[in-house]
Amino acid sequence: MKVTAQAQPNIALVKYWGKRDLARNLPAVSSLSITLDSLWTRMSVSFGGAGTDSLEVNGAVAPTMLDRVSGCLDLVVGSERECAQVVSESNFPIGAGLASSASAFAALVVAADEAAGSGRDTLMLARLAGAASGSAARSLYGGIVELTAGIDEIDLRNLAEHDEWPLEVVVAVTEKGQKPVGSGEAMVRGAGTSPFYSSWIERQDEDMKCARTAVAERDFASLAHIAEHNCLKMHSVMWTSRPPIVYWNKATLGCMEVVRSLRAAGHSVFFTIDAGPQVKAVCLPESADAVEAALSATHGVVQTMRSGLGTGARIIAT
Ligand code: PMV
């Protein structure tokens, strides 16, 4: 049976950076994210026969990602399984700091679980997705999502459904190429070499608390404040890793400046940046047109994309 699942990327407002357990890919910190709706990855999975797994990404054979996909399928279905044919399609640039691995692995576990007839619940699927890509666990859920990092496993819950606080996101793409250092390798380097890593870990629960309260009170200004602070702290760990990891380019800085000026002009907007040079501006719906116009006119921005909040990963065809 061929099963297709869709998941959307999620953007962390309180970031996951650092691993407690490398082998099980357990995060060292809790995180809080929003799941998007208009950017998506669709994964089709079917099992059949012996031989080797195959993977096609956006119409081309993708041998470099095959090991990670096969490893994830082993976790979902068991390593004694039949071989899998996996076809992935995304409507946004992949491997460029736009959380494509989150949507890909979230969709993959949902499709594989259904194709194998395992019937796991959302939390179990999220834990499996998280073992493949830490941030992918959050894309199993929609709206505003909290991931709690436990000693032996992660827990997840919805803080608000996608229509309970209609935030908008404008993504400013400043470069479409693949990122120079993958997030997994960068996290390990940061933990081993950045003098700021231990305080990053120590302060995270405090940031989570602020963000959780801001969400509960629908207090955009407080959410903006903590999200920018947490993002800049994560990038400070990256910058002070040895050798340093700097994902930003000139346009990244230009976009941050534009977001600050929009805010000074009265718009409800803040920025966040992940392991790449793209800037994600989160805003209230009434500011979205102005934010998109200003970011698309910013020097070095090659594309903007806009999204509201969406639902979690789901089956779309069997
Ligand atoms: O899930 P990974 O291993 O691609 O790590 C994602 C890390 C960040 O995107 C930078 C932060 C986050 O919480 O999503």
Image (tube, grey):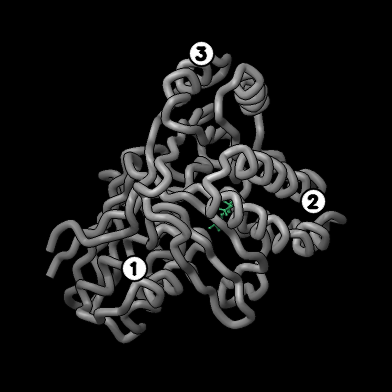
Q: Residue at x 72, y 60 (%)?
A: 206
Q: CA distance from mark 2 to mark 1?
A: 33 Å
Amino acid type at image mark 2: Ser
Which one is closest to the eye, mark 3 or mark 1? Answer: 3
Q: CA distance from mark 3 to mark 1?
A: 39 Å
Where is residue 137 drawn, in percent x and y? 45, 64
Q: CA distance from mark 3 to mark 2?
A: 33 Å
Q: Earlier in the sequence, mark 3 or mark 2?
A: 2
Q: Is residue 293 above or below residue 205?
A: above
Q: Check contact, mark 3 vs mark 2: CB within 8 A.
A: no
> Which residue position is annotated with label 3?
297
Q: Residue at x 32, y 49 (%)?
A: 41
Q: Could you classify mark 1 by the number of other residues whose Cα lies within 10 Å: few (under 14), some (14-19), or many (20 or more)?
A: many
Q: Residue furthest right?
A: 195
Q: Is residue 231 visible?
A: yes
Q: Is residue 124 above or below residue 137?
A: below
Judge by depth and name the residue closer to the eye, 214 or 185: 214
Secondary structure under badge 1? helix
Amino acid type at image mark 3: Ala
> Which residue position is annotated with label 1?
109
Work out which quarter of the rendered image holds the N terminus and state it.
Answer: bottom left
Q: Residue at x 29, y 67 (%)?
A: 110
Where is residue 166 drawn, in percent x and y? 40, 41
Q: Could you classify mark 3 by the number of other residues whose Cα lies within 10 Å: few (under 14), some (14-19), or many (20 or more)?
A: some
Q: Is residue 242 left or right of residue 6?
A: right
> Which residue position is annotated with label 2?
241
**Ligand 1 quadrant?**
bottom right
Where is residue 14 drawn, in percent x and y? 62, 52
Q: Could you classify mark 2 by the number of other residues whose Cα lies within 10 Å: few (under 14), some (14-19), or many (20 or more)?
A: many
Work out which quarter of the rendered image holds the C terminus and state it.
Answer: bottom left
